[in-house]
Image: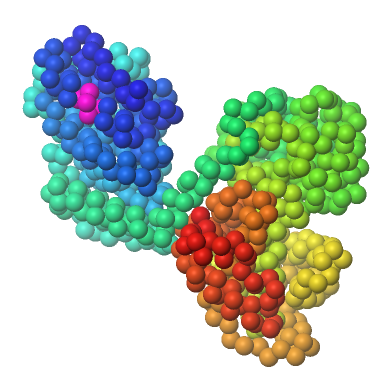
């Protein structure tokens, strides 16, 4: 039942019932429309209350219908709102918990609105590259005023109902009900049952005292903040239409703008990311109802930057953590860093003092593995060396209780080999956090060959609890993200040999939208990390060619920001990357030694060699079953590697660019004698999809 109907003492109550957030799918819209018609036809009904069951009034459109004919089937949302406006009996929207998107637009189509405190009210469509499409840009300014409404529409962020109800002169909520919402809504409906004419938001006047000047200011501000996103600027245009045009003309402008935005690559990318994030939790052979193990206490091995960051995630979620180190001074430094991070949040007003104290009270430390015996899960965050991992996991196997989950934070090493250091490989899993672990959203969950399904389900659930985007990876060197970034880094090195400077490559990548180019990223992470991995590669994969520029850099001790010199020069206490004459001369000397004459390389070539190297390697990961789906690859890069969200991730971007064009470019790169022709042979999966006329995502 998508909406229920009942009559209580002359008031019809229509209750949306489409869990989890009462999405306004076709069946729900039809049921509400039928309920309105039924109430209209019943002479005993004097008024109508519209509300939502469970923990939401309505979260808006039903995401399960996106892209399907049902999304536009009549009654569509515009038709339903018009039916509410035309109803001859007063409709009171009883808003609680969640009232967003189309849910708020439906409430604005009702004659009255009452609310309970604490409801999250928002028009979040801008986050999908859209503007509200069912009157939100036209009605919200009429009830909240232009500036408050525009701020909500442009940001897409929720505002608490009691805050909105407290705005002087607001007409969004007719009453704030502190007690039982339904009882208050019924009482209010009876009070207004005979009031005529029925108030309509569409009939309200809206203006701004400074008119054109204000909107130009807003347009300039939004344009500077959202230069890669068209939707925020279009929000300003639509709200201005509410002021400048008659209501129906403003509605037509809003709808045309909404439809035009729907076809932009930015909207496609943002909608792709929205669905991709939700898809990451779906594991084909692990049903959603798989029983999970209780994790009421966690242990972390290592109190360094990564170990401390990992611990903070769980402290933030209210889970006690015991942190182990070999020496007391290392523990003291780790705890001090955690305190410093929290104190910084308190100072900035992002964390209350009592919350800080509560979190620190959940943290304990030890030098003895024996003190970990009662932990339900342990995460190892020690040096990235298999011998070190072996020593740790043998000790954990000896002390951890039966059923405890043993996790490794390894970024590249073989989780199956690590699991075999124990007598319980079914309890071992990889949890690859990204640095800084208390900030970065991505968590690669590495499923070993023996990892039990309930262990995987538990870690995925736990990841959600600590607010991570969890992506499942199979076991291979580097998993999804780092295996792909190796090819990206190889291309960056080849570009230097062929004629680029580090600054040129970084500028092109950052202009494309990356948060940071490959060389600035290397300086931030530490160039010695990549050097360590390459040394291993030279032994394991002697035929895999790398540019030697990065090795030459490290031989000079230029490891990045931490040494004050890397691909760039750095001034003490500052992070500004200053192009280095020494590095540019080093690259030129190396180029000359190889007999290469530098050529001019376009930004377009730089960007597409970097991005399509990610795409080709990702296609191989999909073929091997390391990644479950192409959208998972995109989520790894959107949440862990600074790939521009407005481009949707490397696989989404490849689809937008055109798979035929991508394959042609790969073949072109393969013919470059200074590049790796074997790598650039298009992955069989790409050729198969192209032959079948299919997209990657």
Q: Out of 13 and 26, give the one closest to the viewer.
A: 26
Horizontal side, residue 359 vs residue 66: left or right: right
Q: Position of residue 51 (x, y in %)?
A: 31, 23
Magenta stretch holds residue 309: no
Give the number of marks.
0
Which segment is the magenta one? 32-36
Q: Residue furthest front?
A: 692
Q: Position of residue 544 (x, y in %)?
A: 78, 70
Horizontal side, residue 409 vs residue 183: left or right: right
Point out the image quarter for the N terminus: top left
The secondary structure that dominates the magenta segment is helix
Q: Position of residue 572 (x, y in %)?
A: 71, 64
Q: Out of 519 and 363, give the one closest to the viewer.
A: 519
Q: Out of 585 and 681, give the one closest to the viewer.
A: 681
Q: Position of residue 241 (x, y in %)?
A: 20, 53
Q: Quadrant of residue 603?
A: bottom right
- Residue at the spot 81% in from the left edge and 72% down from the top edge: 543
Q: Quadrant of residue 526?
A: bottom right
- Residue at the spot 84% in from the left edge and 44% down from the top edge: 418
């Amino acid at each position: 039942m998508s909406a229920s109907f009942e009559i209580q003492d002359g008031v019809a109550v229509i209750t949306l019932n489409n869990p989890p957030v009462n999405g306004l799918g076709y069946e729900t819209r039809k049921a509400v429309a039928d309920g309105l018609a039924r109430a209209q036809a019943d002479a005993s009904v004097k008024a109508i209350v519209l509300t939502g069951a469970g923990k939401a009034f309505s979260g808006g459109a039903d995401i399960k219908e996106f892209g399907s004919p049902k999304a536009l089937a009549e009654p569509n949302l515009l038709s339903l709102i018009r039916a509410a406006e035309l109803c001859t009996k007063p409709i009171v929207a009883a808003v609680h918990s969640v009232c967003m998107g189309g849910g708020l637009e439906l409430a604005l189509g009702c004659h009255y609105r009452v609310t309970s405190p604490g409801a999250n009210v928002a028009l979040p469509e801008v986050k999908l590259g859209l503007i509200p499409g069912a009157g939100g840009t036209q009605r919200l300014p009429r009830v909240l005023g232009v500036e408050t409404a525009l701020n909500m529409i442009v940001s897409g962020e929720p505002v608490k109902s009691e805050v909105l109800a407290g705005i002087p002169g607001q007409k969004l909520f007719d009453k704030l009900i502190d007690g039982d919402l339904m009882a208050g809504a019924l009482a209010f409906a009876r009070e207004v049952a005979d009031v005529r004419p029925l108030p309509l938001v569409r009939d309200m006047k809206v203006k701004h005292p400074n008119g054109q000047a204000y909107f130009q200011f807003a347009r300039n501000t939004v344009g500077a903040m959202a230069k890669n996103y068209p939707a925020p600027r279009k929000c300003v245009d639509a709200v201005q239409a509410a002021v400048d045009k008659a209501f129906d003309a403003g509605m037509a402008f809003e709808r045309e703008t909404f439809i035009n935005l729907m076809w932009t690559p930015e909207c496609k990318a943002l909608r792709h990311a929205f669905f991709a994030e939700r898809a990451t939790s779906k594991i084909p052979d692990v049903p959603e109802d798989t029983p999970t193990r209780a994790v009421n206490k966690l242990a972390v091995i290592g109190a360094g930057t990564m170990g401390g960051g990992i611990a903070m995630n769980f402290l933030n979620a209210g889970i006690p953590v015991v942190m182990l180190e070999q020496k007391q001074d290392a523990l003291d430094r780790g705890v001090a860093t955690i305190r410093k991070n929290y104190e910084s949040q308190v100072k900035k007003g992002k964390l209350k003092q009592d919350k800080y104290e509560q979190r620190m009270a959940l943290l304990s430390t030890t030098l003895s593995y024996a003190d970990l015996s009662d932990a339900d899960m342990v995460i190892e965050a020690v040096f990235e060396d298999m011998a070190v991992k072996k020593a740790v996991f043998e000790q954990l196997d000896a002390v951890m209780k039966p059923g405890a989950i043993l996790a490794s934070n390894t970024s590249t090493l073989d989780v199956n080999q690590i699991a075999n250091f124990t007598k319980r490989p079914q309890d071992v899993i990889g949890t690859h956090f990204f640095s800084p672990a208390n900030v970065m959203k991505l968590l690669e969950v590495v499923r070993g060959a023996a990892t039990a399904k309930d262990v995987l389900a538990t870690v995925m659930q736990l990841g959600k609890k600590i607010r991570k985007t969890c992506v499942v990876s199979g076991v291979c060197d580097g998993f999804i993200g780092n295996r792909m970034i190796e090819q990206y880094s190889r291309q960056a090195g080849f570009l230097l040999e062929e004629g680029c400077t580090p600054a040129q490559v970084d500028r092109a990548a950052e202009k494309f939208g990356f948060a940071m180019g490959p060389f600035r990223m290397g300086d931030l992470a530490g160039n010695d990390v990549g050097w360590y991995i390459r040394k291993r590669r030279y032994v394991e994969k002697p035929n895999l060619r790398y540019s030697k520029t990065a090795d030459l850099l490290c031989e000079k001790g230029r490891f990045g920001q931490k040494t004050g010199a890397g691909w760039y020069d750095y001034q003490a206490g500052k992070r500004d990357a200053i192009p280095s004459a020494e590095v540019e001369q080093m690259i030129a000397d190396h180029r000359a030694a190889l007999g290469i004459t530098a050529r001019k390389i376009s930004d377009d070539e730089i960007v597409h060699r970097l991005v399509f190297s990610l795409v080709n390697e990702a296609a191989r990961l999909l073929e091997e079953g390391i990644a479950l789906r192409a959208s998972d690859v995109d989520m790894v890069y959107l949440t862990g590697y600074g790939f521009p969200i407005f481009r949707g991730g490397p696989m989404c971007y490849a689809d937008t660019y055109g798979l035929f064009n991508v394959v042609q470019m790969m073949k072109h790169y393969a013919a470059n004698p200074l590049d790796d022709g074997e790598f650039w042979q298009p992955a069989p999966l790409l050729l198969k999809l192209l032959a079948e006329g299919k997209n990657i995502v």
